[in-house]
Image: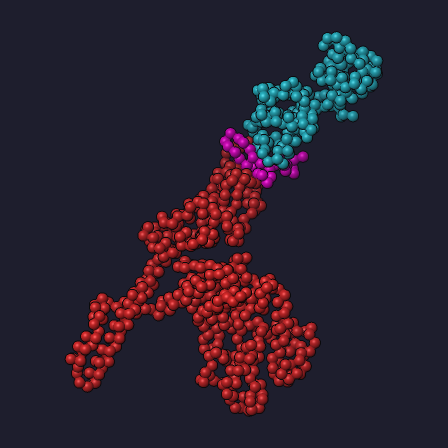
Amino acid sequence: MPDPLPPAYTNETFPFPPHYSFPPFFTLQPNPLTRTSQLQSWSSLILSYTRHHRLSTLSVVESYNTPLFHNPSLNRRLPTSDIREILTYMSSKDGGERVEWIGKHGKDGGAGGKCWVYWRRPEEWADVLESWVERTGQKGVVLTLYEIGEGDATVGAEFHGLDPELLQKSLGVLVKKGRAQIFGAGEDQLGVKFF
Amino acid sequence: KYKIPQFQHGQAYLTSHRVCWLDNEDPRKHSVAIDLKDIDRPELYAGFLSSSPKITLYSKINKHGVSSLQQKSPYSPSSTPTRRQSQTRPIAPTPTLGPNATWVCPICSFSNPIPPNFDPATANANTKIPKCQSCGIPPPMVLVVKAALAAMSNRQAKPESPAPAGPIETQSFGTFRCTRCTFENHPSLLVCEMCGASLVTAADKRLEVERGDLDRAESPGPVLKELNLNDDKIESVKLSFRGGGEKIFFERLKGAMVQRKWLLQSAPPIPRPTDSKRATSPRESFERRPSDNLVGIAGLERRGQALRESNQLIIGNAFEDLEALMTSAKEVIALAERFSSQTADGDGGSSEANAVVSALGLTTTKDMLGSDTLYISELSRNLAEFLTDDTKGVLRKEGGIMSLVDLWQVFNRARGGVELVSPADFSKAAEMWDKLKLPVRLRRFKSGLLVVQGRDRTDDKTIASILAWLKDLHFDPPRAEVRWDWTLYGRGVTAQETAQRFGWSVGVASEELEMAEEKGALCREQGLDGLRFWENWIVNMPALMI
């Protein structure tokens, strides 16, 4: 069971790891061993940061200036090419496959590039949803996706405010498992029924 | 008569003052030098069948029978006019009389000891022989000489006094039967209890043990465990030329000894030109003399004096050129040595001096030595000596490590404007350092940079010294205001700062830093002000955190 997040967490300042205040951390290391260690540290930093701020996606260009990749006190920042390098690492098997690039990889086409950051995977979200359905006794009830994501009933649940696409993905996992069914036409009018 | 295992492969050098022998395996430990002034005469033995040609150097034996051939401290080369190389090995000296030599008195048959300073080679009618201890009658000289020779040929042990060493070996061998009187002695005795004859069979056992250590299976001949030349009783040293070159070496050696004699006994002064003119007609001058003849003693004196003068003129005439060469040779050599020491410092030294220096062959030049490899190996040794010379401190000034190009420049500058070394020869000579086991070595960085450093400097030592310096920076507050926790992380250093701290050149410093980074000791940081290197906290986070 994934551990529940306290909802008020997002208002506190994010505690950066000690690496963050070490200037060489912002330079990609050529030495393979050092580089592996560096990538791992960045990976955990990104995941915890996105988890803290409840970000589901990351855009290279937009996150370049955020405190994630730019340390104002040190005045050091990670260049975009390195950001992409780290995200690619995270999407690989060695990196834990917690990142998924959206659309074209963006390697050749400029500094763009958006990716999903799964600090919690769709499968894990699916489990959360299922346990919530069970807890609230909503089996057999038809709910719209909007209700689940933004409805008043779900305020306080972890998945409240979740990105609709991610929500849909998670529900898709349940559909595959045979625990739910999605129907309806149109983006906003999709409904789901849990078994 | 004995071979020594550690002295099997090496090179012999002949200088104007000594004969040196350099071991190929461990030059620092097993090199020997023999002063020419201690050599009485050399002898050449041309090889026969499987026995290689040898040169024997006999040492001068002074009155007390103690030879003056001693072992010198490790090889220290000096500027030399000639050098010849061949594969040689020295053979151990033949021993002299030990304390156990005895002669048997013909009258009372008591065994008297032969005095230790008695030498059969130099004994003549004037040598004092002590009387027989029991009957008091001095023996005939011949008898003592014969006894001494017999004793010497029987003695096969090490030149040291065998008394302290003997007992250890002979414990295990039962009783000893004396060869002269067949009395069974205790094995630890060295002299027979009954008749006083020396029991030398113990030494044979020792020899047999050592024979097993022979590396060269096909060569006969007993071997000594190690060379102990510090003893006084050495008579001769043999150099065996397995690789050839003995004839030239012998000629040069003889020449060097003759030259020594000339230098020691300073040659008579050059006869002046006026004398030489007069010398062309000594007969006339001599015949003119009688006209001035006075009668009596004065006349006789004058005649004798005239005779002496004419003799001197004749002899002077004959050796005129040779004397001129000898005296001026002495002066010229002194001059050239002075110049060579000047130019080696790198200051001054006019080009004429350098021309003289190279003309006299005081530096290694290509045309001087016939073969290429010989030139390269000699150049290699020259370079190593130049680098490790403490008075100049070339390597020390550069912090113990310098690039090959820098060294090439310094070396050529020290040589003066004449006889520079080409880069190709230089790099070849540098590569031979490892093969010749010299104390400096060539090292190649990942980027291809070649540097020179002492043999005992390893990468780990360099990394340790860099890290120690970086650790100190934890306590030293940085000059500018910095935004990170310098007490925790220290600070980063540039290649420039590193070069300044250790005395290296900047190129060498950046290479060393990159090498340390590759080993994982440092990590890099590319900032706006350049590339800096830090202690690798990425991998080893301080234990305080987390």
Residue B381 painted magenta: no
- In percent of the image, x 80 and y 19: which residue is there? A177
In this rendering, the answer to whether A139 lies above or below B145 is: above
Q: Residue furthest front?
A: B49
Q: Is residue B466 left or right of residue B368?
A: right
| Quadrant of image for the C terminus of chain B | top right
* Quadrant housing residue A19: top right
Q: Residue furthest left?
A: B291
**Residue A194 percent across, percent down from the top left:** 81, 15
The front one of B213 and B541 is B213
| Quadrant of image for the N terminus of chain B | bottom right
* Quadrant housing residue B446: top right
Look at the image and tell me whether residue B523 can be seen. yes
The front one of B523 and B279 is B279
Colour approach in the figure: by chain
Magenta-highlighted residues: B517-546
Which chain did the renderer colour cyan? A
- In percent of the image, x 43 and y 67: which residue is there? B36
- In percent of the image, x 53 and y 30: which residue is there? B527
The colour of chain B is: red
The front one of B90 and A25 is B90
In this rendering, the answer to whether B23 lies above or below B158 is: above
Residue B531 painted magenta: yes
* Quadrant housing residue B271: bottom left
Q: Is residue B513 left or right of residue B169?
A: left
Q: Is residue B231 left or right of residue A190?
A: left
